[in-house]
Amino acid sequence: MVGRNQPCPCGSGKKYKKCHGAVDQATIGLLIAQELEQVISLFFTTHPKPEDVRANAGLFTEWERRLSPYYDRETIHSQAIEYLYLINQPAAWQTHVASAGMKSERPAVRRTLSKWASPLTLFAVVESVSDGTAVIRDVLEDGTYKWAVPEDMEVEKGEAVFGHFLPDGREEDTILLMNSLAFVEPGHDEVSAQASRLRKLKKHLDSQKFLDRYMLDLYELIGHGEAVAEPETAETAAVSEETDEDPILGLVGRYLVENRIESAELEEKTERFLEEVNPKARKPESVAAGAIRFGQMTGLLSGFEMARTKLAEQFDVSPSTVQKYADDMMKFHKAEAVN
């Protein structure tokens, strides 16, 4: 029990009675997590700078040219921004993190931010998932990490992920997802194997130089590998008792009504996807937001424009999760059209 006149355990340097008072340790931990999340959010809210877009116009053009067959424009833009600021020209991110560390009053936050100057870029296979934590193995540098999976995201054993991560700092060997994420579904092991072979062929390059030269190739590899792979057959499962309304369909329908959008075709395609794939999401909002995003990507929501980040905010899920389920729907309906 912390005395009222003792230093507050949040590390602010103030007395407990003048700081968090009756706030317990769990709540303090939540405040620390929120402050760390705000550091990431603020950076991507204020970047890219217009002058950086102009100076790197050729980079954005090349990424869109090569990746447009596999990803939507907003996803490509996010991938290119992350490459620019975390790999190619990291000074802005490093300055942002250093400034946030100096401003924070919490030692736990400062300690964590001191490890954030160089994010981890991983092409990793999920080896196990338990209680919201996934053990992932990087096929590029052979490290193994514990990943605190966001509550609104679903990953499974055998899946591969490619993106940028940050050391948690509060728990040894645990990492946090930084922003966007590309997925390789289970059963597409050749995609991860090709990434590993490329890294071995270029072992004379250090990790930073390798990613600087080949990150675009890795995103292209994932997109191409997912596009040409045989569609995965959904496993048979016991069908649960039907209810009056599927919660995901209900969310999609209500969103369309609230935003005065008519798209019976989107509702039909969402229902078909749910029946055949039966996605195992922790939150129905994750799939519903993905369905709306899918509608945007396919032109089913004529005249409706909204950034993926804003859509994610409305459904209280992460942008990566929105894109994951949108991509899943896209793959399903493309495969169905071929068959």
Image (cartoon, rainbow, N blue to C red):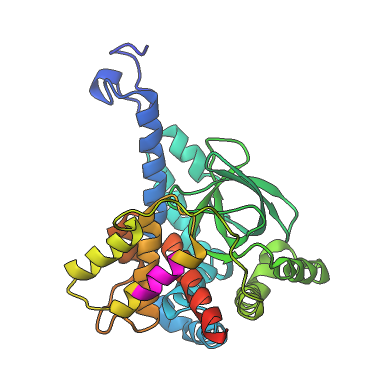
In the rendered image of this protein, does residue 93 appear above or below residue 148? Answer: below
Q: Residue furthest front?
A: 241
Q: Position of residue 119 (x, y in %)?
A: 57, 55
Please say whether residue 31 is visible from this viewpoint.
yes
Q: Position of residue 36 (x, y in %)?
A: 42, 45
Residue at point 48%, 76% (across, down)? 330
Q: Is residue 51 left or right of residue 198?
A: left
What is the total number of numbered labels drawn onto the structure image?
Answer: 0
Q: Position of residue 150 (x, y in %)?
A: 47, 49
Q: Quadrant of residue 229?
A: bottom right
Q: Position of residue 123 (x, y in %)?
A: 65, 61
The rendered magenta stretch, by its main secondary structure, is classed as helix
In the rendered image of this protein, does residue 21 appear above or below residue 84? Answer: above
Please say whether residue 105 is visible from this viewpoint.
no
Let me know if residue 97 is in the magenta part.
no
Residue at point 62%, 78% (across, down)? 220
Q: Is residue 316 left or right of residue 255?
A: right
Let me know if residue 272 is in the magenta part.
yes
Q: Is residue 81 left or right of residue 104?
A: right
Q: Is residue 75 left or right of residue 315?
A: right
In the rendered image of this protein, does residue 27 appear above or below residue 200? Answer: above
Pick whichever, 334 or 1, lies toward us.
334
Residue at point 66%, 68% (across, down)? 211
User: Quadrant of the image for the C terminus?
Assistant: bottom right
Pick whichever, 97 or 4, lies toward us.
4
In the rendered image of this protein, does residue 178 appear above or below residue 233? Answer: above
Q: Which residues are magenta?
A: 268-274
Pick whichever, 179 or 239, lies toward us.
239
User: Quadrant of the image for the N terminus?
Assistant: top left
Pick whichever, 117 or 227, lies toward us.
227
